Image (cartoon, rainbow, N blue to C red):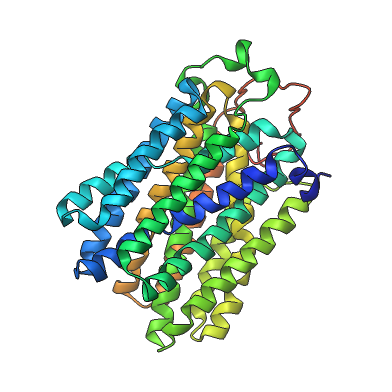
Amino acid sequence: MTTLRQVLAVPGMTPLLGISLLARTAITADGVALTMYVLVALDMSYAAAGIVVSALTAGVALGGPLLGRMIDRRGLRTVLLTTLVPQIVFWLTVPVLPYMILVGAAFAAGLLMVPVQSATRQAITAMTTAGQRRAAFALESVAGELSYMVGPAVVILCAATASPSVVAWGVGAAIVAGGAGIALLNPPLRAKDEADGEAAARPRRREWLGARMVAVLTMGFGVAMLLSGVDLAIVATLQEVGQLSWASVVVAVFGVTSVVGGLVYGALPRPMPTWLLLGLLGLVTVPAGLAHDWRWLCAALIGAGLLTAPTLSTVADAVSRLTPAGVRGEAAGLHSSAASAGFALGSPIVGAAIDASVPAAGFAAAGLTGLLAALVGYLLSRRSPAAAPSPPSSSQEVEPCDAGAPAP
């Protein structure tokens, strides 16, 4: 059994995860920073702020596969340095851009967002053996949870004491610093035995983007929708009972339990199928709507929190296992795009359910979304035999059970 300590001992793994955490913390807060700028500096509505954030998110979703394809063709460092320039320009000019131009610039900045998450996942695949990979992706998911806990909270706190323009500059500087750090580190994106020959060839898309990969991407989309909806349902529930000030505590408890779940899952000797983890996550999310007090809501979300990081890590692990080395960047970009689309759609769908009924309907809608994605993923994964991305090498032997394997 691979321990988390053994994964961290892999050369280059600790600095990679550390730099990635810095950049991802800033990236998770970029929407909040733009929201605060539009609300406070421009004195405009929440709807206006939402349009800017939606433009940024749409750009990220569309740009992920394109940047991933560029990484496959041109290499990581070239793409990172190329994306740093537009980020510097965008975040420096945010305070002087008229609103309509800001919307277009936000879309362009999202389209050329520094591909930190996809690059980190590709590097993890190249730097680890099959036996180490699940624990490594569990650590990566834990880092993602920490970034969601820290980034938005720090931006909101800073916005209360500094101008929104300064906050935007700070977020941009952190994104650029993280991207530059990974460019300097320049982690390998292919194992030594994948650098040349057949493993490095670029297969046709239909050879790897089959039913199983679509199943995994569907589940990645579903878990993102679920998590986005849960955040909104928490706010709606506490607002109805006059306890909105406790929302940060509930979200913190949810995040901490997710971190614990990721660490425990990474240390387990055997993985679980992605569809099963996502289905369980959806199942335990639905009853959270029965809580009508912040204390009970904290307790009700413990189960969902414990399953969040494990589910995210199995999706990333499954993508890596089903992807040939020559298209790993494009696949990682598709994974990031699916997650971005899920986060963008989760809130409006759950919000509509809340508006049409009660806040409890938000948790029900989020949970049912997860269950539906798990069912679709399970059915699609049964449609065809497992893909064979590339011949396993001595350093990357395939485990008998993984997230993309046929369900028992």
For image coordinates 74% across by 37% down, the residue present is 11
Query: On the picture, is 213 further left or further right than 193?
Result: left
Pick the front one: 157 or 301: 157
Task: Give the quarter of the image for residue 298.
Answer: bottom right
Query: On the picture, is 18 further left or further right than 104?
Result: right
Q: Quadrant of the C terminus?
A: top right
Rendering coords of residue 293 (x, y %):
51, 86
Asked whether residue 364 is in view, the answer is: no
Query: On the picture, is 133 further left or further right than 182?
Result: right
Rendering coords of residue 71 (x, y %):
48, 27
Above-or-below relation of 120 to 161: above
Rendering coords of residue 374 (x, y %):
53, 50
For image coordinates 42% across by 79% down, the residue present is 237
Asked whether residue 88 is in view, the answer is: yes
Above-or-below relation of 123 to 221: above
For image coordinates 74% across by 46% down, the residue present is 8
Above-or-below relation of 361 to 131: below
Pick the front one: 153 or 378: 153
Q: What is the tally of numbered marks visible in this picture?
A: 0
For image coordinates 84% across by 44% down, the residue present is 1
Rendering coords of residue 265 (x, y %):
72, 54
Furthest residue in direction right, as rendered: 1
Furthest residue in direction top, as rendered: 197
